[in-house]
Amino acid sequence: MDSPPVDSPATSSDLLVDIVERLEACGLEDDTYQLHDYVDVDALDQLVNASQADVEVQFTVEGVQLVVTPDNVDVLIDQRERSEPQ
């Protein structure tokens, strides 16, 4: 059985921390949502890290659109800028 590459992210808890940090950077406090209502972090971690091909998973939490790859978690659109009065 193949083992994951040495340089792959350590655990799904690392992915969880990355997602929460990105959401907090967009102004979304962790006590305002239940992440498990939006995504199964363990399954997401297995999906992006087990694939031999390039994988990108997108999902939205409270209006913040995220993209997860084996290497990182990014925000696709900064929702704060779109919702600020002009």
Image (cartoon, rainbow, N blue to C red):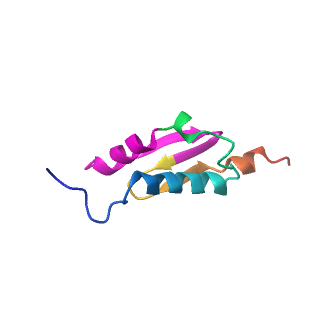
Q: Name, please, the residue furthest toward the top.
A: 37
Q: Name, please, the residue furthest toward the right.
A: 86
Instruction: Name the quadrant containing residue 9.
Output: bottom left
Vertical placement of residue 39 versus 16, above or below: above
Image position, residue 56 (x, y; %): 41, 46
Question: Residue at (27%, 65%) from the top-left corner?
Answer: 6
Image position, residue 69 (x, y; %): 41, 52
Vertical placement of residue 35 versus 68, above or below: above
Q: Nearer the viewer, residue 73 or 54?
A: 73
| 52 in magenta | yes
Left or right position of 83 against 50: right
Instruction: Name the quadrant containing residue 63.
Output: top right
Left or right position of 50 against 78: left
Image position, residue 11 (x, y; %): 38, 55
Question: Residue at (69%, 46%) from the top-left corner?
Answer: 79
Left or right position of 28 against 7: right
Question: Residue at (38%, 40%) from the top-left corner?
Answer: 43
Image position, residue 40 (x, y; %): 45, 38
| 68 in magenta | no
Vertical placement of residue 40 versus 70, above or below: above
Question: Residue at (56%, 41%) from the top-left corner?
Answer: 35
Give the residues drawn in magenta, as a range. Answer: 40-66
